[in-house]
Image (cartoon, rainbow, N blue to C red):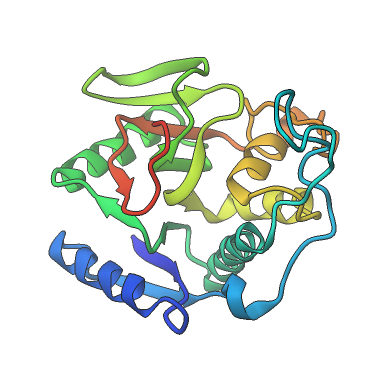
Amino acid sequence: MRAVCLCTPVEDPDRFARAQAHFRDVGRTNVDYLLGRHKSTAGLDSDHLYMVDRGPGSPDAGVPYRMGKHPVNIWLGHYMAWQALKLAREEVWLILETDAKFLPDWKARAQWAIKAVQRVDPDWDLLYLGSCNCRGHQTVRVAGDDTLGLYVVHGSGPQCNHAYVLRAKAVPTFETTLRRVWAPIDIQQTSECFEHGRVLPRSLPFDATTRRLKVYTVLPRIVDQWDTELTP
């Protein structure tokens, strides 16, 4: 399976070098790198509001706000990867971010996860090897056990796109549904595209359940993050 890592080596050479070294160290040598855009130089932003207002108790309560340049450029990077997958005419890719941190036993666990999702649902679309924001949501285990399980997560999880396996057949749903750039990509795709995602207030209406992507998550996650500590 081809692995593609989203990176900005011009602006973040140290992060890029760390990612390359880490992937070599864990035996993930066949990685291609997709050069994205960086918040400090690209100048890209979105006019769409992310949230209508911040929650009660916030000093900015009631003030509409946008997500900002950093998530916008990450959003674009993943969209570029999806387009590349489609044009490559390959069936499935592992998509990574530069802060993906493979755990020591990742390979055997990933192999188990791929076999499990193929057995449970041959029509699967997306498999999270690394994720966050699953705790606190309804989770249904469909294979494995507490030490290594395959789950369906309901609600606003899973999130975090640092390591996921995507099938090319899912790309048309992303293309036709994610037309506005209004939220961090991991939040927006969960809200607007996933079969069991929770529709957020600023999401497009999405009632055609046949268009929802079939998403599975490995828990505990196989891939952590170097730079972000979020709830699993």
Q: Is residue 83 visible?
A: yes
Q: Is residue 212 visible?
A: no
The answer to which image quadrant residue 179 occupies is bottom right
Q: Residue at image x 51%, y 24%?
A: 153
* Percent position of residue 188, x then y: 68, 43
Work out whether residue 123 or residue 165 is closer to the camera in this orientation and state it: 165
Residue 141, compared with residue 176, is above or below; it is: above
Residue 186, compared with residue 195, is above or below; it is: below
Q: Residue at image x 49%, y 17%?
A: 136
* Percent position of residue 209, x then y: 74, 28
Residue 150, compared with residue 128, is above or below; it is: above
The residue most toward the bottom is 10
The answer to which image quadrant residue 26 occupies is bottom left
Work out whether residue 226 or residue 138 is closer to the camera in this orientation and state it: 226
Residue 113, compared with residue 176, is above or below; it is: above
Q: Residue at image x 39%, y 31%?
A: 232
